[in-house]
Amino acid sequence: MPTRFRSHSGRVTSLLATLLVGAALVLAACSNDVTRRDVTASLTELVIVPSYEAAADSAEALSTEIRILVSDPTSARLEEAQAAWREARSDWSRVQAYTFGPVMEIRISSLVDWWPIDEAKIERALTRPTISAEDVRETFAADQRGFSALEHLLFSDNVLGRLASGDDAYGQYLTALADVIADAIRQASDEWSGAYGEAFSGSGDLAISENLAIADLVRVPVFLTETIGDMQLGVALGITKAEADPTVIPEGHAGVGIDDLEQNVRGIQDTYLGSSDGLGLSDLIAQLSEGTDQRMRDALSHAIDTIAALKSGGQSLNELVETDPDAVAQARDAIKAVQVILTTEIVSLLGVTIGFSDNDGDS
């Protein structure tokens, strides 16, 4: 599916050479005048591109494990496939802080990460004589595909029984879902490694302005914290909606809701702090307000620690909403604190406009 940023050379690995980022980052790190372009170039090369490549690699590894499971449905193979699903899901959750550009232009989210799923539709699809990746991509609804649909099938109670009994549609659906996920994430990764990454860094004829690039790096974390803080945790706890509704949390049989939250916030932290040998938004904010920079650093660290603490009891996020809502509320408060600093201090200091979410009106 072509876009105006389509790379004609596939996985381009020459972005660093093209932009001379290495030398530029060393100079910028030693300077007291870090520019917005310095930051976008550094984050593209050292954070965003490697993160998307990791997500694509783990999604492809998941696809391979699913194929092995379908051909050899044993308990050991199932555990390996489920572990691969968890890793791929975690890597995808990490990049949610920068799901702009290719992900939105080619509407990858509807192929990879839709919630809620429709379990009845998924089960009805299994009555088809055959299921291909093309079927999943072109004719299935968004609530029948992606990580959550795959989770529904891969973590169900009778996976091995259905595969061993010769249920061809079950194995085909598992394989098709995994293939579509892997192809979509690799497509996004290739865009970032190639033409879109160059444009976002400010290189080439289609260079994106540094102000628009910085705005994206702030805007998406704002909407992400709003989504998980208000539309998910807030609704689940009955804080932002009169009646509590835990089903809004995108968590199925695998129970990875807490990891989703943690990786979401870690992704925000990645773009704020940058890599250990590069630059991040923090370098811009610190020049304008050391106090705001420290508050953001502290808020991110506190949010991650508070979310991680939810894992101590071994319960899923949905279970904790019922058994320990105060702990979940504390995690929500910590996420909201990050959002407040973003929407007030950081937006003001950088002079960026938030506007509307790319998900508004999406279907």
Image (spheres, helix red, strand yellow):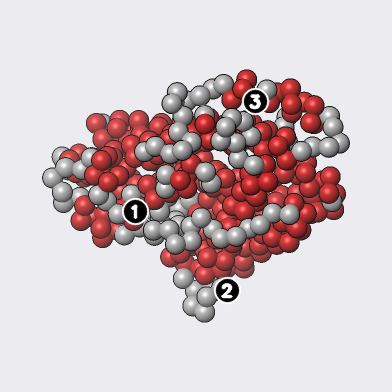
The amino acid beneath tag 2 is Ile
Instruction: Mark 1 or mark 3: name the one nearer the start of the chain.
Output: 3
- Measuring 20% from the left and 56% from the top, which residue is drawn there? 124
The CA distance from mark 1 to mark 3 is 38 Å
Instruction: Mark 1 or mark 2: name the one nearer the start of the chain.
Output: 1
Quarter where residue 333 is shown = bottom right
Q: Is residue 204 left or right of residue 108?
A: right
- Measuring 47% from the left and 67% from the top, which residue is drawn there? 246
- Report if residue 98 is visible in the image: yes
Q: Residues within 10 Å of mark 1 (few under 14, many from 20)?
A: many
Residue 27 spot, x, y in % from top left = 80, 26
Residue 29 spot, x, y in % from top left = 80, 31
- Measuring 66% from the left and 62% from the top, which residue is drawn there? 336
Q: Are marks 1 and 3 in contact (CB under 8 Å)?
A: no
The amino acid beneath tag 1 is Ala
The amino acid beneath tag 3 is Leu
Which residue in the protein does label 2 denote? Answer: 239
The CA distance from mark 1 to mark 2 is 28 Å
Secondary structure of residue under mark 1: helix
Q: Is residue 176 left or right of residue 355?
A: left
Instruction: Mark 2 or mark 3: name the one nearer the start of the chain.
Output: 3
Q: Residues within 10 Å of mark 2 (few under 14, many from 20)?
A: some
Q: Nearer the viewer, mark 1 or mark 3?
A: 3
Which residue in the protein does label 1 denote? Answer: 142
Residue 95 spot, x, y in % from top left = 55, 43
Secondary structure of residue under mark 3: helix
- Measuring 57% from the left and 45% from the top, which residue is drawn there? 98
Which residue in the protein does label 3 denote? Answer: 19
Q: Nearer the viewer, mark 1 or mark 2?
A: 1
Quarter where residue 237 is shown = bottom right
In this rendering, the answer to whether 27 lies above or below 108 is above
Secondary structure of residue under mark 2: loop
